[in-house]
Amino acid sequence: MPVSAKICGLSTPATLDAAVAGGASHVGFVFFAPSPRNVGLDLAAGLAARVPAQVRRVGVFVDPDDALLDAAVAAGRLESIQLHKTAPERVAAIRSRLRRDTWAAVAVKTRADLDAARSYAGAADRILYDAKTPPGAALPGGMGLRFDWALLDGFRHPLPWALSGGLDPANVAEAIARTGAPLVDVSSGVEEAPGVKDPARIGAFLGAVTRV
Ligand SMILES: O=C(O)c1ccccc1NCC(=O)[C@H](O)[C@H](O)COP(=O)(O)O
């Protein structure tokens, strides 16, 4: 089964085009003002128009309100909603109201953190395992942090899932081999600076995934 890849935090036509050309299955647009990858509605609309039918547009949010979701879904023509720091009941309500493929991010540092994934069964369509960022960090994701992949050994995933956190062109093949991830997600590992994606690194990441 081929492994799918999401390139997250895209904010320019050139890097979006590199993700599409390299075979990304998903492209992510961040709607979170403190992020260096935040896209406004106009930018999201322009980027969304470049995405071909076979690639899914994912909006990335941190416990969003309905007004932001509605505006972003319309502007970015979002097919999937990725929710960080959002309680299961709220994830379920968003999924029910928007009727979109809905991902719940689970922040992982210890094995006990994985228990949170179970609470999203019936509420979300997919779990995104991501590295837990330190207390007080400005962002709950996109910080290039990795968690111990061995924590996933033997874990019974309650939903379809994806792996993220500190992935890059050099380690993604090992990550897939080690965890069996069906979908991998990257942001800072394909950047030259926070929020500045590098088309060559995007191509290298997707090439490494394709060769698995
Ligand atoms: O990327 C951001 O700036 C961001 C901001 C707020 C919430 C989530 C965010 N990113 C989520 C992602 O999907 C990232 O791809 C994931 O955390 C992995 O990031 P990285 O470790 O930098 O590859």
Image: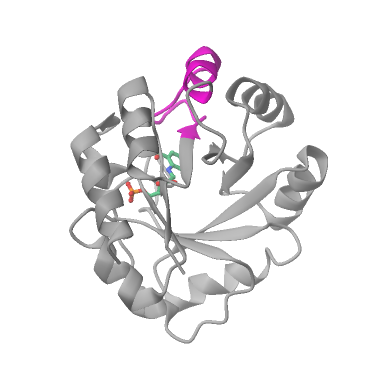
Tell me the quadrant of ligand 1.
Answer: top left
Left or right of 124: which side holds 153? left
Q: How is the image coloured?
A: one colour
Task: Check the image and report above or below for 15 versus 55.
Answer: above
| Magenta-colored span | 29-48
Q: Is residue 17 magenta?
A: no
Tell me residue 206's x, y (percent): 30, 50
- Total marks in image: 0
Observer-nearest residue: 131 or 48? 48
Tell me residue 120's x, y (percent): 68, 63
Task: Check the image and report above or below for 211 versus 135.
Answer: below
Left or right of 8: which side holds 32? right
Tell me residue 130's x, y (percent): 43, 58
Res 201 → quadrant: top left
Left or right of 36: which side holds 79? right
Does residue 192 appear in the picture of this structure?
no
Residue occupying image coordinates x 35% and y 56% = 165
Residue occupying image coordinates x 61% and y 20% = 75
Res 199 → quadrant: top left
In this view, the residue farthest toward the top is 42
Residue occupying image coordinates x 35% and y 80% = 150
Q: Quadrant of the C terminus?
A: bottom left
Residue occupying image coordinates x 46% and y 22% = 39
Observer-nearest residue: 5 or 91? 5
Task: Check the image and report above or below for 114 versus 98.
Answer: below
Does residue 116 appear in the picture of this structure?
yes
Tell me residue 68's x, y (percent): 65, 26
Q: Is residue 39 magenta?
A: yes
Res 14 → quadrant: top left
